[in-house]
Amino acid sequence: RNTDSLAPLWYVITVTGGVYGSAVIIIALTFYLLKYFKKEPKKKSSVFFFAGTVLIFQILISGSTLFYFKDVFRNPRPSQLYISERVSSDKSGKEFLTAPPEEKSLYLRKKIEENKRAFEDVYPPILSSWSDESGFSFPSGHSETSFFLGTILAFVLFKTGSNKYYIFIPVIWSILVALSRVVIGVHFPADVVAGAFIGLVMAFIITSFKKIKIIFNKNI
């Protein structure tokens, strides 16, 4: 709600799990590893291999979810159901839920604009995200990204950090991003659970690669 003092914080958290947030994290991870292995120039190419692998998996995860899985399940977002039930009494209010994302986005913007008073209690940036994020709900792409990158970061920090407790930072971030998707109204709990599971599985696959393990082997 607009009166919720934590609304801006939840919105910022959810943004960090998006496209720009994931790009910043992968770039920062690359620079961190280059600095960590600066005394081992032979591992420079391995660092780029690792970062490239993470990037490719991230693109595959996001792409398959956006262009395949969401369209297979075609579950509407809670925000879309809320808008349709609050401002539409005609049949079109339900039919728009299965429309293509572009049409759905235009419909949502139109209904929000025509019924401003009905949404005065919603934090403006979150309200904008309701019309911008017009795709289907299941599974949550942000949750996939946060748990995928969060697990990768935890793995790297465990292997390279002087304080092993640092691994809890990306873990907590992952959980908060997933929670934020439910809090701001764009996903159901089942969406984020499924997304988190996919992200975890993909991260464990990468960290199980023999070539990846060798990079962090201090005896090499």
Image: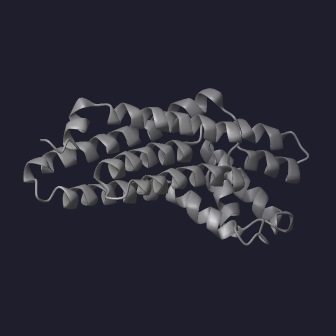
The answer to which quarter of the image holds residue 138 is top right
Residue 70 visible, this orientation: yes
28 relative position to 203: left or right: left
Q: Position of residue 98 (x, y in %)?
A: 70, 35
Display coloring: one colour
Looking at the image, residue 47 sits to the left or right of residue 138; the answer is left
Q: Relative to 109, is 75 above or below?
A: above
Q: Residue at x 64, y 48 (%)?
A: 134
Q: Residue at x 46, y 41 (%)?
A: 62
Q: Position of residue 184 (x, y in %)?
A: 69, 56
Q: Is residue 126 left or right of residue 208?
A: right
Q: Position of residue 45 (x, y in %)?
A: 14, 47
Residue 76 in picture, x, y percent from top left: 71, 39
Q: Quadrant of residue 34?
A: bottom left
When asked about the image quadrant of residue 113, the answer is bottom right
Q: Nearer the viewer, residue 93 or 42?
A: 42
